[in-house]
Amino acid sequence: MCGIVGIVSKTPYPSRVLLDRLKRLEYRGYDSYGLYDGRTLLRRIGGIRVEGGGRTTAGIAHTRWATHGGVSERNAHPHLSCDGRVAVVHNGIIENYEELRRGLLRKGHRFTSETDSEVIAHHLEDGLRRRPVEAALPRLFRELKGTFAVLAMVRGRDEIFALKRDSPLVLGAAEGRTILASDIYAFSDWTDRAVFFENDEMAAVGPSGARFFDATGRPIRKPARTFRWEQDRGPRRTAGHYMLKEILEEPAAVGRLLFSLGGDQKPAFDRLVRLIRRTRKVIFASCGTSYHATLLGAYYLHRTGREVQTLIASEFRHFAKVDAETLVVAVSQSGETMDVIDALKYARANGGRIAAIVNVPHSTIQRMSELSLNILAGPEVCVASTKAFVNQAVLLLALARAFGFPVRLETIPDRLRALFRQRARLRAMAVRIARSRDVYIIGRGLTYPVARETALKIKETSYIHAEGMMGGELKHGTIALIEKGTPVLSLINAGDPDIISNTKEVEARGAEIFVLTNHPTLGGDRNAVHLKTANDGKFGILAAAAGQLIAYYAAAALGRPIDKPRNLAKSVTVK
Ligand code: AGP
Protein backbone atom coordinates (compact mmCIF):
# COMPACT_ATOMS: atom_id res chain seq x y z
CA MET A 1 0.00 0.00 0.00
CA CYS A 2 1.40 3.34 -1.08
CA GLY A 3 4.09 3.32 -3.71
CA ILE A 4 7.35 5.20 -3.43
CA VAL A 5 9.92 6.07 -6.07
CA GLY A 6 13.25 7.89 -5.97
CA ILE A 7 15.60 8.40 -8.90
CA VAL A 8 19.21 9.58 -8.81
CA SER A 9 20.97 10.18 -12.10
CA LYS A 10 24.43 11.23 -13.26
CA THR A 11 22.87 13.70 -15.68
CA PRO A 12 19.69 15.79 -15.27
CA TYR A 13 16.42 14.07 -16.24
CA PRO A 14 12.91 15.53 -16.63
CA SER A 15 11.16 15.51 -13.24
CA ARG A 16 8.03 14.07 -14.82
CA VAL A 17 9.96 10.80 -15.23
CA LEU A 18 9.33 10.37 -11.50
CA LEU A 19 5.59 10.47 -12.19
CA ASP A 20 5.96 8.18 -15.15
CA ARG A 21 7.64 5.58 -12.89
CA LEU A 22 5.15 6.26 -10.10
CA LYS A 23 2.28 5.57 -12.48
CA ARG A 24 3.57 2.01 -12.77
CA LEU A 25 3.05 1.68 -9.00
CA GLU A 26 -0.36 3.32 -8.97
CA TYR A 27 -1.99 -0.04 -8.16
CA ARG A 28 -0.44 0.29 -4.70
CA GLY A 29 -2.77 3.21 -3.87
CA TYR A 30 -4.42 6.04 -5.76
CA ASP A 31 -5.85 8.49 -3.24
CA SER A 32 -3.25 11.19 -3.95
CA TYR A 33 0.27 11.57 -5.31
CA GLY A 34 3.18 13.95 -5.29
CA LEU A 35 6.84 14.58 -6.05
CA TYR A 36 9.78 16.63 -4.86
CA ASP A 37 12.75 17.24 -7.15
CA GLY A 38 14.90 19.49 -4.97
CA ARG A 39 13.07 22.60 -6.10
CA THR A 40 9.43 21.84 -6.84
CA LEU A 41 6.93 20.24 -4.47
CA LEU A 42 3.88 18.94 -6.31
CA ARG A 43 0.93 17.33 -4.49
CA ARG A 44 -2.35 16.32 -6.07
CA ILE A 45 -5.47 14.31 -5.29
CA GLY A 46 -6.61 11.46 -7.52
CA GLY A 47 -5.06 9.51 -10.36
CA ILE A 48 -1.51 10.30 -11.48
CA ARG A 49 -1.08 12.72 -14.39
CA VAL A 50 2.41 12.64 -15.86
CA GLU A 51 3.13 16.36 -16.11
CA GLY A 52 5.61 19.10 -15.19
CA GLY A 53 8.53 20.76 -16.86
CA GLY A 54 11.50 20.80 -14.47
CA ARG A 55 14.72 18.81 -14.58
CA THR A 56 16.68 17.28 -11.73
CA THR A 57 19.39 14.77 -10.88
CA ALA A 58 17.53 13.51 -7.77
CA GLY A 59 13.85 13.36 -6.87
CA ILE A 60 11.30 11.39 -4.87
CA ALA A 61 7.62 10.62 -5.49
CA HIS A 62 4.72 8.90 -3.73
CA THR A 63 1.29 7.49 -4.52
CA ARG A 64 -0.90 7.20 -1.43
CA TRP A 65 -3.39 4.77 0.05
CA ALA A 66 -4.65 6.79 2.98
CA THR A 67 -4.29 5.39 6.50
CA HIS A 68 -3.72 8.33 8.87
CA GLY A 69 -5.51 11.46 7.72
CA GLY A 70 -8.09 11.86 4.97
CA VAL A 71 -7.53 12.23 1.26
CA SER A 72 -6.34 15.81 0.79
CA GLU A 73 -3.47 17.70 -0.79
CA ARG A 74 -1.93 18.51 2.56
CA ASN A 75 -1.91 14.83 3.53
CA ALA A 76 -0.32 13.87 0.22
CA HIS A 77 3.42 13.08 0.23
CA PRO A 78 6.20 14.27 0.01
CA HIS A 79 6.27 15.95 3.40
CA LEU A 80 8.73 18.74 4.10
CA SER A 81 10.25 19.66 7.45
CA CYS A 82 9.65 23.17 8.87
CA ASP A 83 12.69 24.76 7.27
CA GLY A 84 12.29 22.76 4.04
CA ARG A 85 15.69 21.09 4.53
CA VAL A 86 14.22 17.61 4.53
CA ALA A 87 11.67 16.02 2.19
CA VAL A 88 10.36 12.50 2.75
CA VAL A 89 8.04 9.93 1.24
CA HIS A 90 6.91 6.99 3.36
CA ASN A 91 5.10 3.69 2.97
CA GLY A 92 4.03 1.96 6.19
CA ILE A 93 2.73 3.06 9.57
CA ILE A 94 4.69 4.91 12.25
CA GLU A 95 3.11 3.49 15.39
CA ASN A 96 4.66 5.97 17.86
CA TYR A 97 4.06 9.07 15.73
CA GLU A 98 1.89 10.77 18.33
CA GLU A 99 4.57 10.50 20.98
CA LEU A 100 7.30 11.70 18.57
CA ARG A 101 5.05 14.50 17.36
CA ARG A 102 4.46 15.74 20.90
CA GLY A 103 8.21 15.88 21.52
CA LEU A 104 8.83 17.74 18.27
CA LEU A 105 5.99 20.20 18.93
CA ARG A 106 7.65 21.04 22.25
CA LYS A 107 10.82 21.80 20.32
CA GLY A 108 8.92 24.25 18.12
CA HIS A 109 8.17 22.12 15.05
CA ARG A 110 4.95 22.95 13.26
CA PHE A 111 2.99 20.23 11.46
CA THR A 112 0.86 20.81 8.41
CA SER A 113 -0.72 17.39 7.82
CA GLU A 114 -2.65 14.76 9.80
CA THR A 115 -0.37 11.95 8.69
CA ASP A 116 1.91 9.74 10.75
CA SER A 117 4.56 10.17 8.04
CA GLU A 118 5.25 13.88 8.48
CA VAL A 119 6.93 13.17 11.80
CA ILE A 120 9.81 11.54 9.90
CA ALA A 121 10.72 14.79 8.10
CA HIS A 122 10.67 16.78 11.33
CA HIS A 123 12.59 14.14 13.26
CA LEU A 124 15.31 14.13 10.64
CA GLU A 125 15.48 17.92 10.57
CA ASP A 126 15.78 17.92 14.35
CA GLY A 127 18.62 15.40 14.17
CA LEU A 128 20.43 17.45 11.52
CA ARG A 129 20.56 20.45 13.85
CA ARG A 130 23.17 18.68 15.93
CA ARG A 131 24.67 15.96 13.78
CA PRO A 132 25.45 15.02 10.17
CA VAL A 133 22.91 12.97 8.24
CA GLU A 134 25.08 9.86 8.70
CA ALA A 135 24.37 10.06 12.46
CA ALA A 136 20.83 11.44 12.22
CA LEU A 137 19.60 8.40 10.24
CA PRO A 138 20.61 5.73 12.81
CA ARG A 139 18.89 7.87 15.46
CA LEU A 140 15.76 7.90 13.29
CA PHE A 141 15.99 4.12 12.92
CA ARG A 142 16.30 3.74 16.70
CA GLU A 143 13.35 5.95 17.52
CA LEU A 144 10.79 5.07 14.85
CA LYS A 145 8.42 2.24 15.82
CA GLY A 146 6.28 0.54 13.21
CA THR A 147 6.75 -0.29 9.56
CA PHE A 148 8.43 1.91 7.00
CA ALA A 149 10.09 2.27 3.67
CA VAL A 150 11.32 5.87 3.64
CA LEU A 151 13.07 7.93 0.99
CA ALA A 152 14.52 11.23 2.21
CA MET A 153 16.23 14.13 0.51
CA VAL A 154 18.35 16.58 2.49
CA ARG A 155 19.13 20.04 1.15
CA GLY A 156 22.75 20.39 0.10
CA ARG A 157 23.21 16.65 -0.54
CA ASP A 158 22.79 15.22 -4.04
CA GLU A 159 21.74 11.86 -2.61
CA ILE A 160 18.55 10.05 -1.66
CA PHE A 161 18.59 8.30 1.71
CA ALA A 162 16.56 5.10 1.95
CA LEU A 163 15.47 3.25 5.11
CA LYS A 164 13.53 0.03 5.38
CA ARG A 165 11.77 -1.91 8.12
CA ASP A 166 8.98 -4.33 7.17
CA SER A 167 7.66 -2.29 4.20
CA PRO A 168 9.03 -3.30 0.79
CA LEU A 169 11.94 -1.43 -0.80
CA VAL A 170 14.11 -2.34 -3.75
CA LEU A 171 16.85 -0.60 -5.71
CA GLY A 172 17.12 -0.91 -9.49
CA ALA A 173 20.50 -0.40 -11.11
CA ALA A 174 19.79 1.04 -14.55
CA GLU A 175 22.17 2.58 -17.09
CA GLY A 176 23.33 5.94 -15.66
CA ARG A 177 20.45 5.95 -13.12
CA THR A 178 19.59 4.35 -9.83
CA ILE A 179 15.95 3.96 -8.90
CA LEU A 180 14.52 3.18 -5.48
CA ALA A 181 10.97 1.85 -5.42
CA SER A 182 8.37 -0.19 -3.56
CA ASP A 183 8.53 -2.95 -6.12
CA ILE A 184 10.38 -3.98 -9.25
CA TYR A 185 7.50 -3.11 -11.57
CA ALA A 186 8.59 0.55 -11.23
CA PHE A 187 11.72 -0.23 -13.26
CA SER A 188 11.42 -3.71 -14.74
CA ASP A 189 11.43 -2.22 -18.26
CA TRP A 190 14.65 -0.29 -17.47
CA THR A 191 16.77 -3.00 -15.87
CA ASP A 192 16.74 -6.58 -14.61
CA ARG A 193 19.36 -5.87 -11.92
CA ALA A 194 18.08 -5.14 -8.44
CA VAL A 195 19.16 -4.98 -4.81
CA PHE A 196 16.49 -6.05 -2.32
CA PHE A 197 16.56 -4.32 1.06
CA GLU A 198 16.17 -6.43 4.20
CA ASN A 199 14.81 -5.12 7.48
CA ASP A 200 16.80 -2.45 9.29
CA GLU A 201 18.96 -1.61 6.34
CA MET A 202 19.55 1.74 4.71
CA ALA A 203 21.33 3.24 1.75
CA ALA A 204 22.72 6.54 0.52
CA VAL A 205 22.21 6.67 -3.23
CA GLY A 206 24.16 9.28 -5.16
CA PRO A 207 25.12 9.94 -8.80
CA SER A 208 28.03 7.53 -8.58
CA GLY A 209 26.04 4.65 -7.03
CA ALA A 210 24.73 3.30 -3.75
CA ARG A 211 26.31 2.72 -0.36
CA PHE A 212 24.52 0.39 2.04
CA PHE A 213 24.46 0.42 5.85
CA ASP A 214 22.84 -1.45 8.70
CA ALA A 215 20.53 0.42 11.06
CA THR A 216 23.48 1.60 13.17
CA GLY A 217 25.26 3.10 10.18
CA ARG A 218 27.83 0.33 9.74
CA PRO A 219 28.63 -0.25 6.02
CA ILE A 220 27.35 -3.54 4.57
CA ARG A 221 27.74 -5.21 1.18
CA LYS A 222 24.64 -5.90 -0.88
CA PRO A 223 25.18 -7.35 -4.32
CA ALA A 224 22.67 -6.78 -7.14
CA ARG A 225 20.68 -9.79 -8.35
CA THR A 226 19.23 -10.46 -11.76
CA PHE A 227 15.46 -10.97 -11.79
CA ARG A 228 13.11 -12.37 -14.39
CA TRP A 229 9.69 -10.77 -14.79
CA GLU A 230 7.62 -12.28 -17.59
CA GLN A 231 5.94 -9.86 -19.96
CA ASP A 232 3.08 -11.01 -22.16
CA ARG A 233 2.98 -9.79 -25.68
CA GLY A 234 -0.77 -9.48 -26.02
CA PRO A 235 -2.99 -6.57 -26.87
CA ARG A 236 -1.77 -3.72 -24.64
CA ARG A 237 -5.01 -2.96 -22.88
CA THR A 238 -8.17 -4.65 -24.07
CA ALA A 239 -11.09 -2.22 -24.17
CA GLY A 240 -8.97 0.13 -22.09
CA HIS A 241 -8.91 -2.24 -19.11
CA TYR A 242 -6.05 -4.23 -17.72
CA MET A 243 -8.54 -6.62 -16.11
CA LEU A 244 -9.76 -7.98 -19.43
CA LYS A 245 -6.24 -7.95 -20.88
CA GLU A 246 -4.99 -9.98 -17.93
CA ILE A 247 -7.86 -12.49 -18.09
CA LEU A 248 -7.17 -13.03 -21.78
CA GLU A 249 -3.49 -13.60 -20.99
CA GLU A 250 -4.36 -16.64 -18.86
CA PRO A 251 -3.77 -19.31 -21.52
CA ALA A 252 -0.26 -17.94 -22.17
CA ALA A 253 0.48 -17.58 -18.47
CA VAL A 254 -0.65 -21.15 -17.72
CA GLY A 255 1.44 -22.46 -20.63
CA ARG A 256 4.51 -20.66 -19.32
CA LEU A 257 3.99 -22.01 -15.79
CA LEU A 258 3.52 -25.60 -16.94
CA PHE A 259 6.64 -25.38 -19.11
CA SER A 260 8.70 -24.14 -16.19
CA LEU A 261 7.32 -26.74 -13.75
CA GLY A 262 8.71 -29.36 -16.08
CA GLY A 263 11.92 -27.36 -16.62
CA ASP A 264 13.76 -24.81 -14.50
CA GLN A 265 11.32 -24.99 -11.55
CA LYS A 266 11.21 -28.80 -11.49
CA PRO A 267 13.87 -29.24 -8.78
CA ALA A 268 12.07 -26.77 -6.47
CA PHE A 269 8.69 -28.33 -7.29
CA ASP A 270 9.99 -31.84 -6.48
CA ARG A 271 11.48 -30.56 -3.23
CA LEU A 272 8.12 -29.09 -2.23
CA VAL A 273 6.41 -32.42 -2.98
CA ARG A 274 8.98 -34.24 -0.83
CA LEU A 275 8.62 -31.68 1.95
CA ILE A 276 4.83 -32.03 1.99
CA ARG A 277 5.14 -35.83 1.97
CA ARG A 278 7.54 -35.79 4.91
CA THR A 279 5.76 -33.16 7.02
CA ARG A 280 3.11 -34.14 9.53
CA LYS A 281 1.07 -30.96 9.13
CA VAL A 282 0.76 -28.62 6.15
CA ILE A 283 -1.00 -25.25 6.42
CA PHE A 284 -1.49 -22.72 3.64
CA ALA A 285 -1.44 -19.05 4.68
CA SER A 286 -2.83 -16.35 2.40
CA CYS A 287 -5.38 -13.56 1.96
CA GLY A 288 -8.19 -12.59 -0.39
CA THR A 289 -8.03 -14.14 -3.81
CA SER A 290 -4.90 -16.09 -2.93
CA TYR A 291 -6.81 -17.63 -0.01
CA HIS A 292 -9.50 -18.81 -2.41
CA ALA A 293 -6.80 -20.42 -4.56
CA THR A 294 -5.51 -22.27 -1.48
CA LEU A 295 -9.05 -23.45 -0.62
CA LEU A 296 -9.15 -24.97 -4.09
CA GLY A 297 -5.66 -26.39 -3.55
CA ALA A 298 -6.70 -27.88 -0.20
CA TYR A 299 -9.67 -29.52 -1.95
CA TYR A 300 -7.45 -30.98 -4.68
CA LEU A 301 -4.98 -32.36 -2.15
CA HIS A 302 -7.72 -33.81 0.07
CA ARG A 303 -8.95 -35.76 -2.91
CA THR A 304 -5.57 -37.50 -3.04
CA GLY A 305 -5.83 -38.43 0.64
CA ARG A 306 -3.33 -35.74 1.71
CA GLU A 307 -4.86 -33.59 4.40
CA VAL A 308 -3.89 -29.93 4.43
CA GLN A 309 -5.38 -26.95 6.16
CA THR A 310 -5.74 -23.41 4.85
CA LEU A 311 -6.09 -20.27 6.94
CA ILE A 312 -6.62 -16.61 6.19
CA ALA A 313 -3.30 -15.08 7.18
CA SER A 314 -4.72 -12.28 9.33
CA GLU A 315 -6.21 -14.92 11.66
CA PHE A 316 -3.35 -17.38 11.33
CA ARG A 317 -1.90 -17.01 14.82
CA HIS A 318 -5.36 -17.36 16.39
CA PHE A 319 -6.19 -20.65 14.70
CA ALA A 320 -2.93 -22.40 13.76
CA LYS A 321 -0.86 -24.58 16.02
CA VAL A 322 2.63 -24.57 14.55
CA ASP A 323 5.53 -26.72 15.68
CA ALA A 324 8.69 -28.19 14.22
CA GLU A 325 6.64 -30.72 12.27
CA THR A 326 4.56 -28.07 10.53
CA LEU A 327 5.12 -26.74 7.04
CA VAL A 328 3.51 -23.38 6.30
CA VAL A 329 3.07 -22.63 2.60
CA ALA A 330 2.49 -18.94 1.94
CA VAL A 331 0.59 -18.18 -1.25
CA SER A 332 0.71 -14.56 -2.41
CA GLN A 333 0.66 -12.74 -5.72
CA SER A 334 2.61 -9.73 -4.51
CA GLY A 335 4.77 -11.59 -2.02
CA GLU A 336 4.43 -8.52 0.21
CA THR A 337 1.10 -8.92 2.02
CA MET A 338 1.74 -7.88 5.60
CA ASP A 339 -0.71 -10.36 7.15
CA VAL A 340 1.02 -13.22 5.33
CA ILE A 341 4.44 -11.97 6.43
CA ASP A 342 3.13 -11.82 9.97
CA ALA A 343 1.84 -15.40 9.77
CA LEU A 344 5.26 -16.52 8.55
CA LYS A 345 7.00 -14.72 11.40
CA TYR A 346 4.68 -16.52 13.81
CA ALA A 347 5.38 -19.85 12.10
CA ARG A 348 9.11 -19.25 12.26
CA ALA A 349 8.97 -18.25 15.92
CA ASN A 350 7.24 -21.56 16.66
CA GLY A 351 9.80 -23.65 14.81
CA GLY A 352 7.73 -24.30 11.65
CA ARG A 353 9.20 -24.60 8.18
CA ILE A 354 8.24 -22.12 5.46
CA ALA A 355 7.67 -22.46 1.72
CA ALA A 356 6.18 -19.91 -0.65
CA ILE A 357 4.25 -19.69 -3.89
CA VAL A 358 4.49 -16.13 -5.22
CA ASN A 359 4.21 -14.15 -8.42
CA VAL A 360 6.55 -11.19 -7.86
CA PRO A 361 10.11 -12.51 -7.94
CA HIS A 362 12.43 -11.87 -4.96
CA SER A 363 9.52 -10.46 -2.96
CA THR A 364 9.73 -10.42 0.84
CA ILE A 365 7.69 -13.61 1.27
CA GLN A 366 9.89 -15.43 -1.21
CA ARG A 367 13.01 -14.24 0.57
CA MET A 368 11.63 -15.34 3.96
CA SER A 369 10.99 -18.89 2.72
CA GLU A 370 13.42 -21.76 2.58
CA LEU A 371 11.82 -22.97 -0.63
CA SER A 372 9.76 -21.08 -3.17
CA LEU A 373 7.99 -21.49 -6.46
CA ASN A 374 7.00 -18.76 -8.86
CA ILE A 375 3.62 -18.85 -10.59
CA LEU A 376 5.01 -16.83 -13.54
CA ALA A 377 1.76 -14.97 -14.21
CA GLY A 378 3.81 -11.89 -15.09
CA PRO A 379 2.97 -8.33 -14.06
CA GLU A 380 -0.64 -8.01 -12.94
CA VAL A 381 -1.70 -4.36 -12.98
CA CYS A 382 -5.45 -4.52 -12.34
CA VAL A 383 -6.09 -4.40 -8.60
CA ALA A 384 -8.48 -7.34 -8.93
CA SER A 385 -6.35 -10.44 -9.27
CA THR A 386 -7.26 -12.73 -12.17
CA LYS A 387 -4.41 -14.43 -14.03
CA ALA A 388 -2.49 -14.79 -10.76
CA PHE A 389 -5.43 -16.73 -9.26
CA VAL A 390 -5.54 -19.04 -12.27
CA ASN A 391 -1.81 -19.73 -12.10
CA GLN A 392 -1.91 -20.28 -8.34
CA ALA A 393 -4.73 -22.79 -8.85
CA VAL A 394 -2.87 -24.50 -11.69
CA LEU A 395 0.27 -24.80 -9.59
CA LEU A 396 -1.72 -26.28 -6.69
CA LEU A 397 -3.45 -28.67 -9.09
CA ALA A 398 -0.01 -29.71 -10.37
CA LEU A 399 0.97 -30.34 -6.77
CA ALA A 400 -2.14 -32.48 -6.26
CA ARG A 401 -1.31 -34.37 -9.45
CA ALA A 402 2.07 -35.25 -7.95
CA PHE A 403 0.08 -36.87 -5.12
CA GLY A 404 -2.15 -38.78 -7.54
CA PHE A 405 -4.94 -36.38 -8.64
CA PRO A 406 -5.82 -37.53 -12.17
CA VAL A 407 -5.63 -34.57 -14.55
CA ARG A 408 -4.02 -33.58 -17.86
CA LEU A 409 -2.83 -30.07 -17.18
CA GLU A 410 -1.53 -29.51 -20.70
CA THR A 411 -5.02 -28.93 -22.09
CA ILE A 412 -5.88 -26.06 -19.71
CA PRO A 413 -4.70 -23.26 -22.05
CA ASP A 414 -6.88 -24.58 -24.88
CA ARG A 415 -9.86 -25.07 -22.58
CA LEU A 416 -9.48 -21.45 -21.43
CA ARG A 417 -9.35 -20.26 -25.03
CA ALA A 418 -12.56 -22.21 -25.75
CA LEU A 419 -14.17 -20.55 -22.73
CA PHE A 420 -13.16 -17.11 -23.96
CA ARG A 421 -15.00 -17.81 -27.22
CA GLN A 422 -18.19 -17.85 -25.10
CA ARG A 423 -17.60 -14.30 -23.88
CA ALA A 424 -20.82 -13.00 -25.42
CA ARG A 425 -22.93 -15.41 -23.34
CA LEU A 426 -21.04 -14.52 -20.17
CA ARG A 427 -21.47 -10.84 -20.93
CA ALA A 428 -25.24 -11.29 -21.39
CA MET A 429 -25.41 -13.00 -17.97
CA ALA A 430 -23.33 -10.24 -16.41
CA VAL A 431 -25.51 -7.47 -17.79
CA ARG A 432 -28.56 -9.09 -16.19
CA ILE A 433 -26.78 -9.62 -12.87
CA ALA A 434 -25.64 -5.97 -12.94
CA ARG A 435 -29.28 -4.87 -12.66
CA SER A 436 -29.47 -6.25 -9.11
CA ARG A 437 -28.05 -4.96 -5.86
CA ASP A 438 -27.34 -8.47 -4.56
CA VAL A 439 -26.19 -11.71 -6.10
CA TYR A 440 -25.56 -15.12 -4.54
CA ILE A 441 -23.05 -17.55 -5.97
CA ILE A 442 -23.30 -21.13 -4.80
CA GLY A 443 -20.95 -24.05 -5.09
CA ARG A 444 -20.07 -27.32 -3.40
CA GLY A 445 -16.77 -29.10 -2.99
CA LEU A 446 -14.41 -27.76 -5.56
CA THR A 447 -16.82 -25.07 -6.72
CA TYR A 448 -17.22 -23.62 -3.22
CA PRO A 449 -13.85 -21.77 -3.38
CA VAL A 450 -14.75 -20.65 -6.89
CA ALA A 451 -18.07 -19.28 -5.64
CA ARG A 452 -16.19 -17.30 -2.98
CA GLU A 453 -13.70 -16.00 -5.53
CA THR A 454 -16.39 -15.05 -8.05
CA ALA A 455 -18.24 -13.14 -5.34
CA LEU A 456 -15.06 -11.29 -4.38
CA LYS A 457 -14.41 -10.36 -8.02
CA ILE A 458 -17.98 -9.08 -8.43
CA LYS A 459 -17.85 -7.08 -5.20
CA GLU A 460 -14.55 -5.39 -5.80
CA THR A 461 -15.08 -4.49 -9.44
CA SER A 462 -18.82 -3.76 -9.70
CA TYR A 463 -19.66 -2.89 -6.04
CA ILE A 464 -22.67 -5.24 -6.21
CA HIS A 465 -23.20 -7.06 -2.94
CA ALA A 466 -22.17 -10.64 -3.76
CA GLU A 467 -22.06 -13.65 -1.46
CA GLY A 468 -20.19 -16.76 -2.48
CA MET A 469 -21.25 -19.70 -0.40
CA MET A 470 -21.64 -23.42 0.07
CA GLY A 471 -24.87 -24.57 -1.56
CA GLY A 472 -25.58 -26.67 1.52
CA GLU A 473 -25.47 -23.63 3.80
CA LEU A 474 -28.23 -21.77 1.96
CA LYS A 475 -31.08 -23.28 3.88
CA HIS A 476 -29.37 -22.53 7.18
CA GLY A 477 -30.16 -18.86 6.80
CA THR A 478 -29.32 -17.09 3.57
CA ILE A 479 -32.29 -18.52 1.68
CA ALA A 480 -34.38 -16.00 3.66
CA LEU A 481 -32.94 -13.31 1.37
CA ILE A 482 -34.10 -14.93 -1.86
CA GLU A 483 -36.96 -13.06 -3.47
CA LYS A 484 -38.55 -13.11 -6.88
CA GLY A 485 -35.83 -12.23 -9.39
CA THR A 486 -32.82 -12.43 -7.00
CA PRO A 487 -29.93 -13.60 -9.18
CA VAL A 488 -28.23 -16.83 -8.06
CA LEU A 489 -25.23 -18.07 -9.98
CA SER A 490 -24.86 -21.81 -9.50
CA LEU A 491 -21.59 -23.60 -10.22
CA ILE A 492 -22.61 -27.12 -11.13
CA ASN A 493 -19.94 -29.74 -11.41
CA ALA A 494 -21.44 -32.65 -13.38
CA GLY A 495 -20.63 -35.20 -10.73
CA ASP A 496 -22.53 -33.42 -7.96
CA PRO A 497 -26.32 -33.92 -7.76
CA ASP A 498 -26.57 -32.01 -4.45
CA ILE A 499 -25.77 -28.64 -5.97
CA ILE A 500 -28.54 -29.23 -8.52
CA SER A 501 -30.95 -29.73 -5.58
CA ASN A 502 -29.72 -26.51 -3.96
CA THR A 503 -30.27 -24.69 -7.23
CA LYS A 504 -33.83 -26.06 -7.47
CA GLU A 505 -34.50 -24.92 -3.88
CA VAL A 506 -33.75 -21.27 -4.67
CA GLU A 507 -35.45 -21.44 -8.04
CA ALA A 508 -38.63 -22.60 -6.27
CA ARG A 509 -38.47 -19.38 -4.26
CA GLY A 510 -38.31 -17.15 -7.33
CA ALA A 511 -34.55 -16.74 -7.81
CA GLU A 512 -33.32 -16.07 -11.32
CA ILE A 513 -30.86 -18.86 -11.92
CA PHE A 514 -27.59 -18.56 -13.87
CA VAL A 515 -25.43 -21.63 -14.32
CA LEU A 516 -21.81 -22.43 -15.09
CA THR A 517 -21.51 -26.16 -15.64
CA ASN A 518 -19.73 -29.01 -17.33
CA HIS A 519 -22.94 -31.07 -17.09
CA PRO A 520 -23.72 -32.49 -20.54
CA THR A 521 -27.37 -31.36 -20.66
CA LEU A 522 -27.72 -28.45 -18.19
CA GLY A 523 -25.42 -26.23 -20.20
CA GLY A 524 -27.92 -25.77 -23.06
CA ASP A 525 -30.18 -23.37 -21.19
CA ARG A 526 -30.32 -19.65 -22.10
CA ASN A 527 -28.94 -18.72 -18.68
CA ALA A 528 -26.17 -21.31 -18.69
CA VAL A 529 -22.64 -21.50 -20.00
CA HIS A 530 -21.18 -24.90 -20.67
CA LEU A 531 -17.50 -25.31 -19.75
CA LYS A 532 -15.91 -28.04 -21.75
CA THR A 533 -14.09 -30.39 -19.43
CA ALA A 534 -14.95 -33.69 -17.86
CA ASN A 535 -12.19 -33.25 -15.29
CA ASP A 536 -13.40 -31.55 -12.14
CA GLY A 537 -9.91 -30.24 -11.28
CA LYS A 538 -9.95 -28.29 -14.50
CA PHE A 539 -13.61 -27.35 -14.07
CA GLY A 540 -12.71 -25.37 -10.96
CA ILE A 541 -10.19 -23.32 -12.91
CA LEU A 542 -12.46 -22.75 -15.91
CA ALA A 543 -15.40 -21.77 -13.70
CA ALA A 544 -13.18 -19.26 -11.90
CA ALA A 545 -12.12 -17.72 -15.22
CA ALA A 546 -15.78 -17.54 -16.31
CA GLY A 547 -16.58 -15.85 -12.98
CA GLN A 548 -13.84 -13.31 -13.63
CA LEU A 549 -15.40 -12.45 -16.98
CA ILE A 550 -18.86 -12.12 -15.44
CA ALA A 551 -17.42 -9.74 -12.83
CA TYR A 552 -15.62 -7.77 -15.52
CA TYR A 553 -18.69 -7.38 -17.74
CA ALA A 554 -20.94 -6.50 -14.80
CA ALA A 555 -18.50 -3.76 -13.75
CA ALA A 556 -18.24 -2.55 -17.34
CA ALA A 557 -22.04 -2.42 -17.64
CA LEU A 558 -22.15 -0.25 -14.53
CA GLY A 559 -19.32 1.99 -15.73
CA ARG A 560 -17.08 1.27 -12.74
CA PRO A 561 -13.36 2.19 -12.60
CA ILE A 562 -12.53 -1.46 -13.18
CA ASP A 563 -8.74 -1.48 -12.78
CA LYS A 564 -8.67 0.75 -9.72
CA PRO A 565 -11.76 0.09 -7.58
CA ARG A 566 -12.45 2.55 -4.80
CA ASN A 567 -10.70 2.07 -1.45
CA LEU A 568 -8.52 -0.83 -2.62
CA ALA A 569 -4.82 -1.31 -3.27
CA LYS A 570 -3.14 -4.23 -4.90
CA SER A 571 -0.36 -4.79 -2.45
CA VAL A 572 -1.64 -4.76 1.13
CA THR A 573 1.43 -3.89 3.14
CA VAL A 574 -0.31 -2.77 6.31
CA LYS A 575 -2.20 -4.93 8.83
C1 AGP B 1 -7.64 -9.66 -5.34
O1 AGP B 1 -8.61 -9.43 -6.31
C2 AGP B 1 -7.72 -8.82 -4.20
N1 AGP B 1 -7.62 -7.45 -4.56
C3 AGP B 1 -7.01 -9.18 -2.90
O2 AGP B 1 -7.94 -9.97 -2.22
C4 AGP B 1 -5.67 -9.92 -2.93
O3 AGP B 1 -5.84 -11.19 -3.48
C5 AGP B 1 -5.12 -10.02 -1.51
O4 AGP B 1 -4.84 -8.75 -1.03
C6 AGP B 1 -3.89 -10.91 -1.40
O5 AGP B 1 -2.81 -10.38 -2.09
P1 AGP B 1 -1.51 -11.22 -2.41
O6 AGP B 1 -1.90 -12.37 -3.25
O7 AGP B 1 -0.61 -10.27 -3.11
O8 AGP B 1 -0.95 -11.69 -1.09
Image (spheres, rainbow, N blue to C red):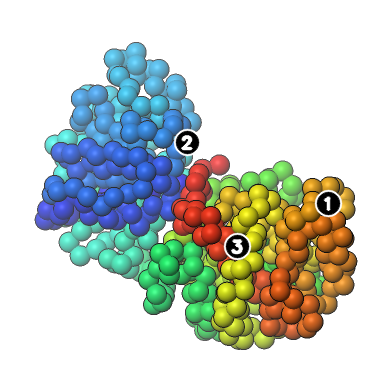
Q: Earlier in the sequence, mark 2 or mark 1?
A: 2
Q: Identify the residue under disc 2.
A: 67
Establish if 159 lies above or below 523. above
Name of the residue lying farthest toward the left: 11
* Residue 360 visible in the picture: no
**Badge 2: few (under 14), some or many (20 or more) residues near its Cα, within 10 Å?**
some
Is residue 418 or residue 117 the one in the foreground?
A: 418
**Badge 3: few (under 14), some or many (20 or more) residues near its Cα, within 10 Å?**
some
Which disc number belongs to residue 431?
3
Residue at 31% in and 15% down: 107
* Residue 477 visible in the picture: yes
Is residue 56 or residue 475 the one in the foreground?
A: 475
Q: CA distance from mark 3 to mark 1?
A: 23 Å
Q: Judge left or right: residue 184 versus residue 449.
A: left
Q: Give the amino acid type for the residue marked by disc 2 in the picture.
A: Thr
| Closer mark to the observer between disc 3 and disc 2 | 3
| Closer mark to the observer between disc 2 and disc 1 | 1
Q: Judge left or right: residue 549 versus residue 3.
A: right
Q: Identify the residue under disc 1.
A: 479
Residue 209 image offset from top left, x and y in percent: 21, 55
Residue 201 image offset from top left, x and y in percent: 37, 46
- Say which element carries label 2: loop
Q: Give the amino acid type for the residue marked by disc 3 in the picture.
A: Val
Q: Give the amino acid type for the residue marked by disc 1 in the picture.
A: Ile
- Say which element carries label 3: helix
Quadrant of res 542:
bottom right
Residue 9 image offset from top left, x and y in percent: 17, 55
Residue at 79% in and 51% down: 483
**Badge 1: few (under 14), some or many (20 or more) residues near its Cα, within 10 Å?**
some
